Amino acid sequence: MDPRYELETLAVEDRHWWYRGRRRIVRDAVRALELPPRAEILDAGCGSGRNLEELATLGQVTGLEPSPASLAAARARGIGQVVAGSVEAIPLPDQSFDLATCLDVIEHVDDDRAALAELRRVIRPAGSLLVTVPAYPRLWSAHDEANRHRRRYTRATLLRAATDAGWRPLRMTYFNSLLLPAAVVYRALSRIQARQMQPTSDLERTPAWLDVVLEQPLRAEAALLRCGLRLPAGLSLLALLGCADPPTRLGRGWAGRARAESHTRR
């Protein structure tokens, strides 16, 4: 990640509408899992460690972070253990965790399948992985450039990468859907302007006073996902993945029944 953008992210992660909305959706998804008592949970690419605060209510947490600045910020929170390392080469033993989250991380790495395979290695046989990624290559923008993304995903490409790495898809859904039409127009206009400007992130373009307004669509989407619905389009993708055998157990509500997603629409 660009150092300037990383510092900006660390400064706004607690209050920014996007991070708050994503935390709500992820929290619901994780709480729907039937985790064992005192579950061991890994947040791979934990950034500032803000998500560790949510996950710590469900078990023993470990953060993994390669960046020195983010690593220091995460450790300063004093929550769980935070280790230095890359998701492509996780410095932790096999089958150490019941759950891993990897939130908007694998789009940054050169080999996403290697990263997903490493996450599979450190998860126990009945464990699971929750991944979020940016959606639709056609929405590539200055934000992706500033954030040093390698790719954006469709449902089909994320499913293919996950299954190639040994994961069984349990549920996949788009989210950040209600803002998608506005984002398509905005990013198209931004691409025209960006031809003669230095790439900038979307964080720089969102004033703090808009956070409350922009968070409301994600609140509504979280309620729909809690009912078991799957959103057909959106700016982001969420995948809940399980080990091939035995199947991950899911609770009611957000996750519903576990079912393999064998087809590859979108």
Image (tube, rainbow, N blue to C red):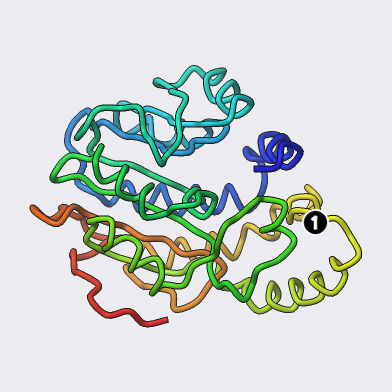
The answer to which of 190 and 24 lies nearer the viewer is 190
Which residue matches tag 1? Answer: 199
The answer to which of 63 and 120 lies nearer the viewer is 120
Q: Quadrant of residue 91?
A: top left
What is the x, y in percent for residue 109? 50, 49
Rendered residue at 31%/43% (across/down):
119
What is the x, y in percent for residue 218? 55, 61
Rendered residue at 52%/19% (across/down):
75
- Asked if residue 138 lies left or right of residue 96, the reply is right
Mark 1 lies on a secondary structure that is: loop
- Asked if residue 85 lies left or right of residue 59, the reply is right
Within 10 Å of the Cα at label 1, are there few (<14), some (14-19), or many (20+) other Cα atoms? some
Rendered residue at 37%/27% (across/down):
62
The answer to which of 215 and 134 lies nearer the viewer is 134
What is the x, y in percent for residue 69? 64, 26
Rendered residue at 20%/45% (across/down):
127
Q: Quadrant of residue 185?
A: bottom right
Q: Which quarter of the image is occupied by the N terminus?
A: top right
Task: Using the image, determine if residue 8 lies above or below residue 136.
Answer: above
What is the x, y in percent for residue 154? 46, 72
Kind of residue at badge 1? Pro
Q: Quadrant of residue 77?
A: top right
Among all residues in the image, which is located at the extreme left?
Answer: 246
